[in-house]
């Protein structure tokens, strides 16, 4: 990461990603925007038992939505579900146990979900994984990439037919402002070369999520695709940061003069690589 990108990102973070920035932006919020019912609409949220995912599930449950919590830990998921049901009074909360680092199981889950449920209005890709050292899953894939990038790709790809059959379908992916310091890298997706830096690998995964979102949006105009940065958030995996809620404004996916824009050819190559890799783990 260049000194310029690092400095520009840090200054942007101080002015836009902190609690102070949220308080400033919140002055222009229109409260009526959130006074809506989502009864009858179905939401799948990955990583829904803690942090941003749990807060999202709680808010939607209070507004009447049906929640599908996709979580890795059964005990924590059931505990979170019980809390959400108790506080919201909404019993339409379902738990699905899935480790997003296990690629074949991601496929199996998504395909099974399509057969069992008739609608899915919103897919929220919230779960994230940041490794301190390079680790691979049982399929030989680097875990951060498997969870943050390939699992997101597979969930979207597999669930698109179900989303397209549902009214007002949406896919929302929780990325990170850290991606602003990264240009899309189509090679070394498994971080096999060079020193492993978990923070930068995570940032690269988040850049990949942005590119995925842009490409899926072009290919499927009937689905509303969004990718967002929640700010520096106080979550179990990021406990030293401050809370900031998204100000709901479109912003650039690149810092000025940071040379992080990829070409159309690079974007298409990345999607082709993802497609081939995903297919290699697809159940037959």
Image (spheres, grey):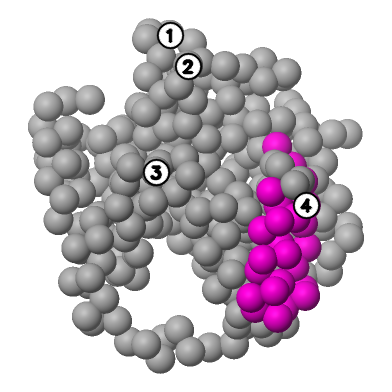
Q: Which residues are magenta?
A: 76-99
Contact? badges 4 and 1 (CB < 8 Å):
no
Q: Is residue 162 visible?
A: no
**Sequence-first disc among 2 and 1:** 2
Along the line of sight, the residue nearer the viewer: 222 or 229: 229
Residue 101, located in which quarter of the rendered image? top right
Alpha carbon separation for disc pair 4 and 1: 35 Å
Report how far apart the C-alphas of labels 1 and 3 lie in the structure. 30 Å
Q: Which mark is residue 96?
A: 4
Give the Cα distance between marks 2 and 4: 28 Å
Please state the horizontal and vertical placement of residue 229, each as a whole percent of the image.
36, 54
Give the residue pinned by disc 3.
239
Comparing 213 with 96, the one in front is 96
Residue topped by disc 1: 193
Q: Nearer the viewer's eye, disc 3 or disc 4? A: 3
Q: Is residue 200 visible?
A: yes
Foreground mark, 4 or 1, reads 4
Q: Secondary structure at mark 3?
A: loop
């Amino acid at each position: 990461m260049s000194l310029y990108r690092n400095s520009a990102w840090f200054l942007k973070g101080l002015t836009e990603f902190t609690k102070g920035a949220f308080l400033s932006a919140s002055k222009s919020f229109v409260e009526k925007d959130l006074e809506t019912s989502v009864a009858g609409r179905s939401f799948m949220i990955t990583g829904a038992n803690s942090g941003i995912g749990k807060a999202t599930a709680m808010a939607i449950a209070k507004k009447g939505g049906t929640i599908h919590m996709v979580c890795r830990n059964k005990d924590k998921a059931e505990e979170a579900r019980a809390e959400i049901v108790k506080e919201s009074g909404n019993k339409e909360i379902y738990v699905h146990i899935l480790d997003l680092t296990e690629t074949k199981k991601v496929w199996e889950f998504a395909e099974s979900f399509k057969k069992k449920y008739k609608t899915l209005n919103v897919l929220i890709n919230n779960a994230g994984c940041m490794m301190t050292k390079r680790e691979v899953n049982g399929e030989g894939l680097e875990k951060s990439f498997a969870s943050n990038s390939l699992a997101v790709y597979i969930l979207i790809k597999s669930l698109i037919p179900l989303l397209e059959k549902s009214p007002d379908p949406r896919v929302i992916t929780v990325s990170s402002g850290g991606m602003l310091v990264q240009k899309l890298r189509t090679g070394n997706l498994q971080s096999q070369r060079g020193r492993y830096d978990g923070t930068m690998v995570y940032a690269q995964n988040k850049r990949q999520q942005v590119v995925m979102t842009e490409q899926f949006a072009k290919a499927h105009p009937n689905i509303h695709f969004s990718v967002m940065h929640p700010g520096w958030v106080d979550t179990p995996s990021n406990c030293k940061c401050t809370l900031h809620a998204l100000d709901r404004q479109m912003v650039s996916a690149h810092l000025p003069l940071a040379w992080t824009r990829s070409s159309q050819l690079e974007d298409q190559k990345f999607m082709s690589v993802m497609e081939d890799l995903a297919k290699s783990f697809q159940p037959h």
